[in-house]
Amino acid sequence: MQDIIYDVIVIGAGVSGCATARELARHEGRFLVLEAADDVCCGTSKANSAIVHAGFDARPGTLMARLNVEGNALFDDLERDLEFAFMRIGSLVVCTSDDARPGLETLLERGRQNGVEGLRIVEREELLRMEPNISDEAVAALWAPTAGICDPFGLTIALFENARANGVEFAFNAPVTALSRDGDTWTVTTDRGTFRARCVVNAAGVDADTIHNMASAETLTIQPRRGEYELLDTTAGTHVAHTVFMLPGPMGKGVLVTPTVHGNLLVGPTADDVDGKRATQTTAAGLATVRERAALTVRDIPFRETITSFSGLRAHRAEHDFFIGEAADAPGFVDCAAIESPGLTASPAIGRMVASICGDVLTRNDPAAFAERADFDPHRKGYVNLHIVSEDEWSALIQADPAYGTLVCRCCVVSEGQIREACRRGARSVDAIKRRLGVTMGRCQGGFCTPRVLQILCEEHPDLDLLSVTKSGPGSEYCVAPVKAPRGGGLDA
């Protein structure tokens, strides 16, 4: 057991955990984030619709409703300070029959109660001008101009890097196996050792019920809800200009069609309750459902341009609201659980709320604790995006470092210089680089660039070789043995 007693330990380095870490970093104290995977953004935060929701869907009076609208309003400043991709393109909820029109009116009224600005219903003629590929059955839609799209990887990584730069510690490959309380201190046992803290935050995604039930006798149940998606190539990225939703149903907002900040077209998700918390496989039936339902709102989607499919798990709770707060029977244990859609949108506000609760915990015994820092730096430098730099800017990059002139990923236009920078900023696997730069996410899905990425990882991290470098952490190694000894011998095959 370490002698250090942290002020707060956050369990989970998804977008909510990293947002909380950044907000904690605004205050005096020692803070640690424990993550079971090898990098941030490895759970729900990496496999979702990447939508910044306007806030008209959640029931008025719920945490979802309040934190959605609050979080949405913070994205412009976050984009400025943290330099990640975000576009406020607006969304449309499409009604495909006059009989369903009351559903639009209900959403409109709910949105106004939640404080969403600019909502209005557009009729078919205007809708066609906004979206020429809208379904022939569409009669009207709810227009929400404050909705947007973002890069969920970029947001989470930006929050992580800024928190780390401001002194928050992170430990990866550290799944939590036990929790116990002794007086005013929590002991957190992991595969990487035992840690102690005055306050513990449970931001463990679909595993949040497991963590909660280690600490509290008032049990929590999380239902993993799988959503399957198809991602189309950038050649299909302009098929719609806004995020197009179906009218929502009991299992969620339905299948959407949206452009992405990377220029692709994203279609999905389904919503199926599953037994396993790692059940992220896609299914033929699920992807067929995606295509069938998407056609109800948008016509002629060019699914022949699909480059990959994927699924993600949402941390659903039967009450369908975020579960945030200090456990009544476990002082100092703070839940940040059941963070499903619109959790990505709400994450900046969730971070503020959870950090404030931690402050209340810490100042009970020491009113002087958790003072605001005068030296907190809210800014973080983003990664170079060769899609948007000018020729002169790219030439300057190459002049400073010739590696920026060597393309490794042709599909997504990523250079060797960018990959080396990502390694130096902490990326240690192919997926970690993918989430930072887009490598392997293009039309060839890594068929061209992966071997060179593996080499660069080994060159930048002396403790890695081609037998140990992974796709996404231990157990996902690319190579199992050399096929022949190098010249001069010395390596057993």
Image (tube, rainbow, N blue to C red):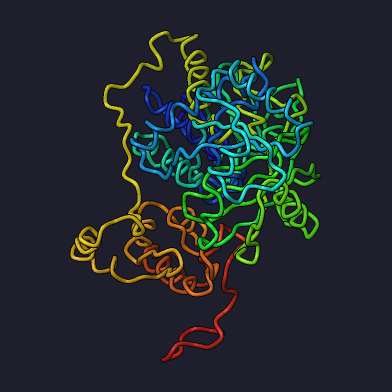
Q: Is residue 17 visible?
A: yes
- Dividing the picture into quadrants, the one containing residue 455 is bottom left
Q: Quadrant of residue 394?
A: bottom left
Image location of residue 300, percent across then percent down: 65, 58
Please name whichever residue, 207 or 281, is drawn nearer the observer in this view of the structure: 281
Quarter occupied by the C terminus: bottom right
Q: Quadrant of residue 54?
A: top right
Task: Please name whichever residue, 260 or 416, is drawn nearer the observer in this view of the structure.
Answer: 260
Where is 134 relative to 404, above or below?
A: above
Q: Is residue 71 left or right of residue 135?
A: left
Q: Position of residue 96 (x, y in %)?
A: 73, 39
Q: Residue at the location (58% across, 18% down)?
A: 112
- Closest to the observer, 437 or 118: 118
Which percent across, then down, holds residue 281?
Answer: 72, 56
Q: Is residue 341 visible?
A: no
Residue 344 position, x and y percent, is 55, 36
Q: As displayed, is residue 148 above or below residue 409?
A: above
